Structure formats: C-alpha cells, structure tokens
Amino acid sequence: MNPRARGSLAPYLLLAPAVTLFTLFMAVPIGYTVYLSLRRTLVSGLGLGKGSRKEVFVGLDNYAAAVGDGELWMGWLRVFGYAALVLAVMLGLALVFALMLDTARVRLARFSRIAIYLPYAVPGVAASLMWGFLYLPSLSPFDALFGVDLLGQSAVTYSMANIAVWGGTGFNMLVLYTNLRAVPQDLYQAARIDGASELQIALRVKIPILVPGIILTTVFSIIATVQVFTEPTALRPLTNTLSSTWSPLMKVYRDAFVTGDLYSAAATAMVIAGISVVLSFGFLRVVRNRAFGEA
C-alpha cells in the first residue's frame, strides 16, 4: 500500500473504535427501542395455547397511549418543579465556588477543589441511600434540629434536590473553574490597574467569560434532572410519599419490569427522550437568539 493511501485510511482507522462502540451501545439499543415501541403482543383466547400470543405491528398506538397517560404528565410536573430547584441552586453554587477558588487570596485552594468535587465521585445510589438514612425520622439528626419529616409529602422533593445538588455541584464547579484558569491573568491585572475590585472583576469580567461554560453546564444539567431516576427510586423503600410513577423514567421502569409491558415502556421512553431533546435545544435556541439580539 502506498503512503498516500495509508494516510487517507488513518482517520477512519482511528475513528473505528468510537464508531463501533457508538453503534453497539447507542444506535442499536435506540433502534431496538423504536422497533418495540411500534409493536404489541396480541393475546387470543386464554393466552395459554401455542400461538395464542403474537407480536403485531400497531404503528403509533403505543405513542398515542403514552401521550394520553395522565400519570406520565403528572410525573413531568413533579420533575419540572424538582428540576427548577436543582438547576437554580446547583448552578448558582457551582458559579460561586468557581469564582471564589479563582481569587488570588484564597487559601487551601487545592483541598477546597477536591472537597467540593468529591461528592460527584460517589455513585448516585450510594449517595441516595446515605442521605436517605440521614432523612429517616428515627435516625436523622435533622429531625430534632428542624422539626420536619424530610421524607414527608411536603419536604421529600427538597430532600431529593439536596442529594442532586450535593452530588452535582462539584462537577459543574470544575467545568467553570477550568474555563477561568484558561483566561490569561493579564486581563485581570489590567482590570485591577483600572481600579476594579475583586467583586467587580468577578461580575464584569469573569462571568461574561464564563457564559459558554454556564450554557454547557446548564444543558447537561437539564438533561440529567429531567431524567431523574436514582434518587426517588432509592428513597422509595424508605417512605410512602413516593409513588412508583413519581418521575417519567420510574414509570418506564414499572411498565417494563413490573407489569411486563415492554412495548408501552419503549414508547414512553422515546417520548421522554423527545421531550428532553426539545428542552435542551429550546434552551440553546433561546440563548442563541438573545446573544444575536444583543449583538
């Protein structure tokens, strides 16, 4: 093989492992989910004899049933309230921590970065169970302190939001902090020479620079929060206030693995994926329109 041909093949060879993994673990499962969502098991008679159960094509019937399911939309309402709380607190804290760690006078910066990031390294199930036992009235140190059942109907959403904030703030902080460290220090020195205080530098220089990073972390956080599953599922055995369909993904799990209706679960999963895509791209479109409008 001549060197020119070998060089033209090099990019494809380097991309092959990533394309293979994407095909096997992303494209194929998504395609199979779409396939299942368009079918249903038809039962004839008592469903006991040979050939009494047949898989038939039903088109968009499963999607129509999913969209018309009130339980799914009640789950979305709960998740939207949860997501609004998590996004505001988590991204706000991540921004504050990143700005604080980037100041010249901060002490123990390395230890602080590790301490803030460390909760993100704890698996979601382990973190949810740990906080769940801390929320139990018989064990909780917060029960006597606040006088509130943190697993009760009025507080359980805030309790789950606390788990998400505790685990996700460090990752978002690290993204924003990394963006700040890439900025030349001469820019900050020029602002100080002009008489700007550290607060003014943070508000008028650093935050505008962080806008792309804030947008990125917001999109990732929207996708993660609207697909919440781990926290309510892990806390559900500890309280009666969380139903098996508290979030849309919990409904998918119930339909697929409890009631055994894989076809309905597949259609609901595709509806959830579609809504997540619309929310993410909708946010990006709003941000882009405002940026162009100001420009």
Image (tube, rainbow, N blue to C red):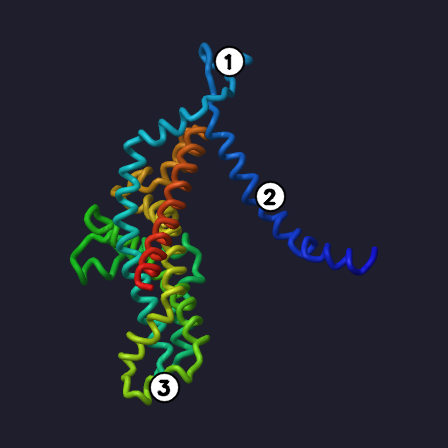
- Disc 3 to disc 1, C-alpha distance: 79 Å
In screen coordinates, is 293 left or right of 212? left
Q: Residue at x 18, y 55 (%)?
A: 148
In front of the other: 204 or 274: 204
Q: Residue at x 28, y 88 (%)?
A: 195
The residue at the far right in this view is: 1
Element type at mark 3: helix
Residue annotated with mark 1: 52
In front of the other: 7 or 79: 7
Mark 2 vs mark 3: which is more N-terminal?
2
Disc 2 residue type (three-letter): Leu
Residue annotated with mark 2: 24
Q: Residue at x 40, y 45 (%)?
A: 277
In screen coordinates, is 35 left or right of 225? right
Pointers 2 and 3 in contact (CB under 8 A)?
no
In screen coordinates, is 185 left or right of 232? right
Residue 2: image quadrant is bottom right
Disc 1 residue type (three-letter): Ser
Residue annotated with mark 3: 190
Q: Residues within 10 Å of mark 1 (few under 14, many from 20)?
A: few
